[in-house]
Amino acid sequence: MIRTKSFLSLLLLTALLSLQLTTRAEDGYRLWQRYDQLPSKNHLKQYRQSLGEVMVQGSSPTLTVVKEELQTALGGLLGQPVTITENSRKKEILVAGTPASSALIKGLNLEADLQKVGKEGYVLVSKKAGGKKYTVIAANTDLGVLYGSFHLLRLLQTQQDISNLQVSNSPKVQHRILNHWDNLDRTVERGYAGFSLWDWHKLPQYIDQRYLDYARANASIGINGTVLTNVNANSLVLTPDYLRKVKALADTFRPYGIRVYLTARFSSPIEIGKLKTADPLNPEVIAWWKNKVDEIYRYIPDFGGFLVKANSEGQPGPQNYNRSHADGANLLAQALAPKGGIVMWRAFVYDNNVPEDRAKQAYTEFKPLDGTFKQNVMVQVKNGAIDFQPREPFHPLFGAMPKTPLMMEFQITQEYLGQGTNLAYLAPMFKETLAADTYANGKGSTVAKVIDGSLHNYSLTGMAGVSNIGNDRNWTSHPFGQANWYAFGRLAWDHSLTSEEIAEEWIKMTFSHDPGFVAQVKNMMMGSRETVVNYMTPLGLHHIMGWDHHYGPGPWIKDKPRADWTSVYYHRATEKGIGFDRTKTGSNALAQYAPDIQAQWGNPATCPEEFLLWFHHLPWDYKTKSGRTLWNELCYRYSGGVDSVRAMQKTWNTQQGKVDKERFKQVQMLLTMQEQDAKMWRDACLLYFQTFSKRPIPQELEKPANTLEYYMSLDPKFVPGI
């Protein structure tokens, strides 16, 4: 009897330990690269049979990374040790390599397939040869093998059938780059996940493991470049002391296919070169930049090039010397061209001394320069013309510069979308812009076709994302912020992917394969960005956030050093109505778009309601498509945003027990914060706009909890990321 009790106790203890192991707390550090044993017995049987031994021929740094990643990942996913070998006698085997590195790959007659995928692409195929069955990862380059390996691992992590693989994949965009707005003192402008990853003080001697894991994560989603420093640049990063540190990072990232880029402060010839001018046409300045570029390449032979913010928000630039943006970009491009480097020249420019609509200024300055930039210059354009708002119409420059490669700039960090505390899945926002039709060459001339070069035959293509990564243990502060980093990489590689399939991949790889969990959380994610738009800036309202820190509502902001840094400049609310008239009767910014778009958006009746107040100033009693007045529709949109956050809370609460306790609780607490934020946005905005509309909030809707004066008195201190 005692022995039976002891045996039962042992069984119970074993069961409890097993339960703890399967639901152990996690801090999110592993991102979507959680290589835990897969739950499906059927998939495990298939995978173990065909992938238990891995043959990788070759010893380059990148192929060494491939071997390490496959051994670690497969060992974890399959729940058993995996052998990496250069020769195998088994009948079923995974083989990875290039025709140059692997005689086996060369003998499988994949030349026709490989010709189609270029330098970074790959094929995944199931092949039978010599009485053996091979699962093949083949590419033209070692880097392609690495990308193909991550694709195969993604198939395993999402439990796909790999018994008859016929995959051919290559990137649609050449330069897929993260922009880190990181300062040399380790603060991060618009960063909400701690301090900068780059510990400049310890570099170059100390290489943090996070640098390697950062490179692994980026390579797994196809990101191939990183701009290490803030666009509000510091010239010190171009000095030898810092170039030695940059070299250490470049050496670390190189095996993963990631090239480093730096931001170049235009006045560097003065600040660190001791010249009297930075005039781009001055011979001494030209010589200085050539010598500086030569110096950089001595440290970093594969240096990617420069990202430049010039003559915007107080940054120095060529206009200081009555030169054009093309003059400034071409100065750097000429120095970089012999080395294979590129210039990414930002089009985010606006000047408070220019009296016209800020939304027009980038187009006004850059459109006349089309065709004047050197071949290794891309003009980097934000998705919208103002500044990464929760929703903007696509930037009018897309489609307007057929002779100049345009590079997309998305903001992954949620500067205007609740920062590091709000859940907002941004893939639908990215897709909304990419799918927008510019009508540049007739119907179907989407922004995506501009970016991938197919519309205008650009020789250079690129997509940049302003990073949301910091040194928080889970990288992005909000666990769901990881999905935006992941989505950016996946869309930069292939913009035809849907938001839904990207979300489903990420959920399965990050949280759980449970079908109910995946379906409910995916639905929650898919509606989250629209939720944020509704409780912040519905119907085309924009730029009405808190002053400077941009956290929370501030529609009352006025009387600042610049008119276009105020909210009243954008919403223009009066007793007669609200909205920014950008039609012929207003700023006529609409004229920067194609005639087909002007015809649709210029009429309030046909303008998409999501852009209604972006382009039109309308009376409070204007009838919206719902049949409600504009005022009542605003009330319902703001209230609906709050209700949607509460629905997200309910959805998440039902997932308890399906994910680890730590991340479940973390998301639960952040959703509580988000509900408070949403209520504050709703109450503050409706009370403020009510002072103009003079109309009541519909009786059936929840009323504000405090007075307008209360919300206007709120001034959060030490908000991160300023």
Image (cartoon, helix red, strand yellow):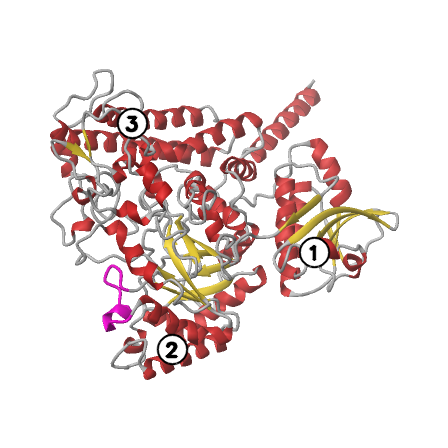
Which residue is more in the foreground, 664 or 610?
A: 610
Q: Is residue 318 magenta?
A: yes
Q: Badge 3: how crowded within 10 Å, few (<14), some, or many (20+)?
A: many
Location of residue 345 (image quadrant)? bottom left
Decide whether the magenta segment is chiefly helix, strand or loop.
loop
The kind of secondary structure element at disc 3 is: helix
Residue 208 is left or right of residue 13, and the answer is left
What is the magenta range? 311-323
In whole angstroms, how far apart are the C-alphas of marks 3 and 2? 52 Å
Amino acid type of disc 2? Trp
Q: Are marks 3 and 2 in contact (CB under 8 Å)?
A: no
Residue at the (71%, 60%) spot, across then down: 98
Above or below: residue 315 compared with residue 284: above
Element carrying mark 2:
helix
Which of the two marks, 2 or 1, is nearer to us in this view? 1
Q: Residue furthest top?
A: 700
Q: Are marks 3 and 1 in contact (CB under 8 Å)?
A: no
Q: CA separation, marks 3 and 1?
A: 51 Å
**What residue lies at 49% left-to-right and 58% top-to-bottom?**
461
Could you say where residue 437 lies in the image, as x and y percent from the top left? Answer: 43, 43
Question: At x 41% / y 36%, what residue is drawn?
Answer: 666
Label ID, residue 637: 3
Cα separation between marks 2 and 1: 40 Å
Q: Which residue is mark 2?
A: 289
What amino acid is at disc 1?
Leu
Query: Which x, y percent locates residue 135?
Result: 75, 47
Circle 1 residue: 114
